[in-house]
Amino acid sequence: MKFTKLSCVLVFFVAMNAYPLGQNLIINVDHRSAVSLNGKWQAIIDPFEIGYYDYRYQPNKNGFFKNAKPRDKTELIEYDFDKSEVLNVPGDWNSQQDKLFLYEGSIWYKKSFDYQRRPNTRVFVYFGAANYHSIVYLNGQKLGEHIGGFTPFNFEITRLVREKDNFLVVKVDNKRRHDGVPTVNTDWWNYGGLTRRVMLVEVQETFIRDYFIQLKRGSLKTVVGWIQLDGKQTSQTITVEIPEANVKQIFNTDADGYVEFEFDAELQLWSPDNPRLYDVIIKSQTDSLSDSVGFRSIETKGSKILLNGKPIFLRGVCIHEQAPKSKARAFSKEHAETLLGWAKEMNCNFVRLAHYPHNEYMPRTADRLGMLVWSEIPVYWTILWENESTLTNALNQLTEMITRDKNRASVILWSMANETPVGDARNEFLRTLVERAKSLDPTRLITAAMEKSYQGKNKPVINDPFGQYVDVLGCNEYIGWYEGLPDRCDLYSWGTIYDKPVIFSEFGGGALYGFNADKDTRWSEEYQEYLYEKQIKMFEKIPFLAGTCPWILSDFRSPRRLLPQIQDYWNRKGLISDKGEKKKAFYVMQLFYEKLKQNEQ
Ligand code: GCU
């Protein structure tokens, strides 16, 4: 199996556009030596970006990144990090202070730290994510920038870091942009800030920066992959060990520090019922790294999805990165365990992480709990299809998403987009994304959440031309909510022009927990309950349906939801309320999935 060497892709990529990308991404930071910079950071709220631009709106070489202090009583310095706000990291800023609830703009973060670097090592500052445009400085020097709010990035600081009094300054700007990904219009809160963990990662001078190890597509025993070293000593001998499977394989990297491998092994296959993870140990002459990896195969056959060669129905639910029972964005292992725990309780074996890559604890927890995952980049609604930097941005987010999570058995689907309007420029844009995804990861399935059209009254059909480029068709439908009343479900007979699996990637309706009325009263739990009953009846008549994903596991913050005393900036389509209370429809889905589970056995 041929892989595309990431390094040459990135080189092309950097050349192609003006964005100073984060340097080559380091993966699996959880198994590396690292120092956390999480905690309280100084922060300056700078709506007019006076810390970056001078009065001529030109970049100011004495900006806030200098963290300057008056040297004597005469010197004029008009900011002081240490007397300014304090914000928690990781964390969005909107839920930390009332005055920042609706804030969209720039905030400067500063963290001071000492650092004892061990000899013959290199140090990188690593960000789990920062929304949206980050400019990073250490000790007054610019390290680089990153665009995109949901994927990790890192910068090397080996030559800049000192033993005492380092100051790391990050300008984070979450202003929405038309040419952005996502663009200016989303049905989720535009949480700003250093929303995920920040750490100093210390590695050997030549270290194992990136690797890929999974089952070959269509095989239950052939392991394929590659390893990328980073450093001067590029030609090295590498061993890949899976002790519990008696695997010990030896390879040699080329002059670029790269090697591909393929070997057979007797492995217990990972599945939701048996989420078997193996310790994988990769050793080079200068470095060693372990990871816990599951091995499973994922394919399609006609309208069936095959996990480890057997058909599986995806009993799913959609999840936003909303911290459970909280107004904040989720970021922690505990948040992941609660959210995926609720999905398990609903008898799910699958989750759609919408509409952007979630924090790394989600796929890693899904690996452990046995939950299949759909992961997506925020190509959402109508972005600027013909804008080159928008495409570059989307390609970059896609590359970072796949780079981070390509060794997670739980992740089976890469989604390119959500509810994007059919059109030549859009089709071409999305086709380019598919090409990139397949070149980076030939082992997983490609999908997107598309919309239906009609081939006659009550005859919805899935015929989006982009469907020809994906392995699995996602379809969002809101029959009984945006489209008629729940009884309309009885009238519909679904069609598709593709012989491919279909997942209803969204369906559902809103309900305010505790508002009880008859089944025809919008926003009541009874309306939502009845809507789900009707949807399920409709599903049972669709032979090519391979999965369902209610919108959505729990109520989430949205600036598009303004109905007083019902929404109040919450999208109420959750099956669980913003306080963790289960609505009646939750139990309808739980029972439906229980039955499917029993039928599978
Ligand atoms: C859309 C969209 C979601 C949105 C949902 C809704 O389909 O994909 O992001 O939240 O519908 O209207 O609630």
Image: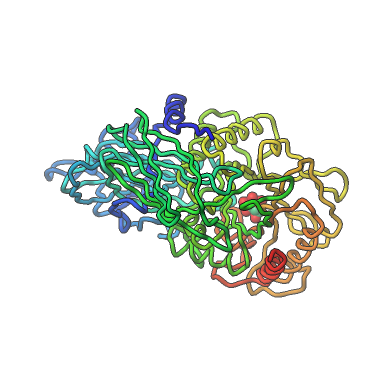
Q: Position of residue 224 (x, y in %)?
A: 50, 41
Which quadrant is home to the C terminus?
bottom right
Horizontal side of 22 relative to 35 (left or right) equals: right
Please state which of residues 243 and 526 is positioned toward the viewer in this rendering: 243
Kindly identify the residue that appears in the image at 66 percent across and 44 percent down. 419
Kindly identify the residue that appears in the image at 29 percent across and 53 percent down. 42
Farthest residue toward the left? 72
Horizontal side of 63 relative to 503 (left or right) equals: left
Horizontal side of 321 relative to 93 (left or right) equals: right
Query: Would you say residue 93 is visible in this rendering?
Result: no
Q: Quadrant of residue 447?
A: top right
Number of numbered discs: 0
Q: Position of residue 155 (x, y in %)?
A: 33, 40
Horizontal side of 396 relative to 300 (left or right) equals: left
Q: Position of residue 565 (x, y in %)?
A: 61, 67
Please state which of residues 369 and 147 is positioned toward the viewer in this rendering: 369
Q: Position of residue 156 (x, y in %)?
A: 29, 39
Q: Is residue 53 above or below residue 338?
A: above
Kindly identify the residue that appears in the image at 20 percent across and 41 percent down. 120
Kindly identify the residue that appears in the image at 80 percent across and 57 percent down. 484
Q: How is the image coloured?
A: rainbow
Which quadrant is home to the N terminus?
top right
Query: Would you say residue 325 is visible in this rendering?
Result: yes
